[in-house]
């Protein structure tokens, strides 16, 4: 009796403007990896569930109609549901790159629950999650800039806190094999972080920030700045504008809860696998590595 080898998936969880686009590209510099970008948003857009979006070419360098991954799926996806659309994508990838480790940078908890959780429980995929966390002050500054400063720093800091706690609760309740990564540590010291990631993933460390322009990615949506900016193929660059902004420093008492969570994550969780103990009523662990004990 023959059995099909489960597809291995690395899901990048986190917040928008949190660095997932550059992280998925970095991971895709490894010869064993290929990135499909944000499958949750991409399938939602291609099935007509999202408002009209710019028709970017695929990050592989071809027009989306000529992309070996997305090209054949464009027409079938127009009439597909979200779940059946994702099944089409997974089947396509199994046919094209059966031995590759897939990277999905969808970020949202919904992507884990809708696309991967049941498949992992059935043994159809081997799922691991990288929880990418950007410093709350840096993230709030970046998202406010993205929103053209139409929101307050305090409001965005609390949005960061609520969204991050939601992700932590999901990973705790499902016991998915997970790793917490600090965006700042990744950008400032990618070599050290790559060593830790490679050890957790059980692969040889062949990641390289010098090959970002040659990363194996098939992303239709993502940060335009990272994908099409003038320095998109350069080394990792950190936006440190928030460090020169004294405004947030004056809001210290109002920011105490998110700052406490921020310190806990970066001092106690980041840079290692998440050790999350399930409640007695929760489901058994879902681990991509049967030998790994959380």
Image (spheres, grey):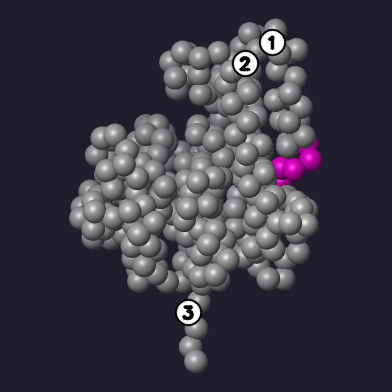
Please determine whether, in this image, residue 183 is positioned above or below residue 81: above
The kind of secondary structure element at disc 2 is helix
Residue on which the image places disc 1: 251
Give the magenta-colored segment's residue range: 267-271
Residue depicted at 65% across the width and 64% down the height:
287
Residue at the spot of label 2: 154
Q: Would you say residue 49 sits in the magenta stretch? A: no
Tell me whether the residue at label 3 lies in contact with that at label 2, contact meaning CB atoms closer than 8 angstroms: no
In terms of sequence position, does the residue under pointer 1 or pointer 2 come before the other? 2
Q: Is there CB contact under 8 Å for labels 1 and 2?
A: yes
In the image, 19 versus 119, the foreground residue is 119
Residue at 41% across, 50% down: 39
Which callout, 3 or 2, points at the residue further toward the start of the chain?
Answer: 3
Q: Is residue 9 left or right of residue 45?
A: right
Residue designated by label 3 = 4
Q: What secondary structure is found at the residue carrying circle 3? A: loop
Compared to residue 8, the image places residue 12 above or below, namely above
Marks 3 and 1, the one that precedes in the sequence: 3
């Amino acid at each position: 009796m023959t059995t099909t080898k489960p597809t291995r998936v690395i899901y990048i969880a986190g917040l928008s403007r949190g660095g997932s686009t550059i992280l998925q590209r970095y991971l895709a510099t490894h010869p064993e990896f290929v990135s499909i970008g944000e499958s949750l948003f991409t399938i939602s857009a291609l099935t007509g569930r999202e408002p009209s979006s710019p028709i970017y070419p695929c990050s592989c360098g071809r027009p989306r109609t000529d992309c070996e991954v997305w090209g054949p799926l464009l027409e079938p996806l127009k009439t597909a549901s979200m779940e059946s659309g994702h099944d089409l994508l997974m089947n396509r990838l199994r046919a094209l790159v059966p031995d590759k480790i897939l990277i999905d940078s969808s970020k949202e908890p919904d992507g884990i629950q809708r696309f991967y959780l049941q498949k992992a429980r059935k043994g159809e995929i081997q799922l691991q999650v990288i929880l990418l966390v950007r410093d709350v002050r840096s993230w709030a500054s970046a998202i406010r800039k993205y929103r053209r400063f139409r929101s307050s720093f305090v409001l965005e800091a609390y949005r960061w806190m609520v969204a991050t706690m939601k992700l932590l609760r999901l990973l705790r309740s499902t016991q998915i094999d997970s790793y917490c990564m600090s965006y700042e540590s990744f950008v400032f010291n990618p070599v050290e972080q790559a060593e830790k990631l490679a050890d957790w993933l059980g692969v040889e460390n062949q990641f390289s920030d010098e090959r970002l322009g040659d990363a194996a990615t098939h992303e239709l949506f993502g940060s335009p700045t990272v994908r099409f900016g003038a320095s998109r193929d350069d080394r990792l660059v950190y936006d440190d504008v928030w460090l020169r902004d004294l405004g947030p420093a004056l809001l210290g008492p109002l920011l105490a809860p998110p700052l406490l969570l921020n310190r806990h994550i970066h001092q106690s969780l980041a840079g290692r696998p998440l050790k999350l103990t399930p409640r007695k009523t929760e489901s058994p662990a879902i681990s991509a590595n049967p030998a790994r004990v959380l």
